Amino acid sequence: MMRKRHWRDRKGVSPVIATILMVAITVVLAAVLYVMVMGLGGDTAVTPTGQVTNVEEITIEDVEVYKLTLSVFSPSTKFSNLNVGGLVDGPLALTEYKGGGLVAGTVYFVDNTGDGTVSQGDYLYILKQDVGNDKVVSILYMPSGGVIVEKDLSSS
């Protein structure tokens, strides 16, 4: 006579194997969430947009400079994340201008709001002798390496 098999007679996965599988799945999920939260899944640096609204040739303490007036950069951008390229000595980091003499090979910024970010009416000072022959200056966003704005100073 044939014996009927019931589903109750079947053996399940051993508790040890089940525990190992649950721990492995938990570790994989935790790693995926960590990568998503920390942003390691890709480059998240987006180059801001902005404009140079005015260029003037002025003299500060007997030194001829270009004064570039800036618009608001979107998204909000810190001066510490900017470089200026197109100059004789290559891209230069920005230094806050606090009065006093100007040093060749330095690009100065004036932060009217004092918050460290580019705001409407903030400006840059670039010494005329630092500008190359083509007189095209680029404001660069360092985290992405992208160009925010290029300005031809010969048309000022």
Image (spheres, rainbow, N blue to C red):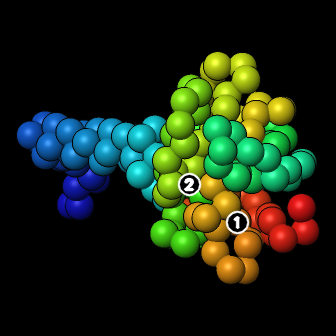
Where is residue 152 shown, x and y percent of the image?
82, 69
Figure quadrant of residue 129: bottom right
Figure quadrant of residue 26: top left
Amino acid on which the number 1 mark rests in the picture: Val
Residue sticking out furthest to the bottom: 134
Question: Is 148 drawn above or below residue 21 in the view shown?
Answer: below
Residue 135 is left or right of residue 2, and the answer is right
Residue 20 is left or right of residue 22, and the answer is left
Number of marks in the rendered image:
2
Q: What is the C-alpha distance between the residues marked 1 and 2? A: 10 Å
Question: In this view of the protein, can residue 65 be seen by the observer?
Answer: yes
For image coordinates 81% across by 65% down, the residue present is 153
User: Which residue does the numbered mark 1 point to in the structure image?
Assistant: 137
- SS of the residue at dot 2? strand
Placement of the N terminus among the 4 image quadrants: bottom left
Q: Nearer the viewer, mark 1 or mark 2?
A: 1
User: Which residue does the numbered mark 2 point to in the structure image?
Assistant: 83
Where is residue 60 shown, x and y percent of the image?
69, 40
For image coordinates 50% across by 69% down, the residue present is 90
Residue 123 is left or right of residue 156, and the answer is left
Where is residue 88 shown, x and y percent of the image?
55, 72
Placement of the C terminus among the 4 image quadrants: bottom right
Amino acid on which the number 2 mark rests in the picture: Asn
Where is residue 154 shown, x and y percent of the image?
84, 71
Q: Which of 111/125 is in front?
A: 125
Alpha-carbon neighbours of circle 2 within 10 Å: few (<14), some, or many (≥20)? Answer: many
For image coordinates 64% across by 67% down, the residue present is 131
For image coordinates 67% across by 28% down, the residue present is 111
Q: Which of 44/65 is in front?
A: 65
Marked residue nearer the N-terminal end (1 or 2): 2
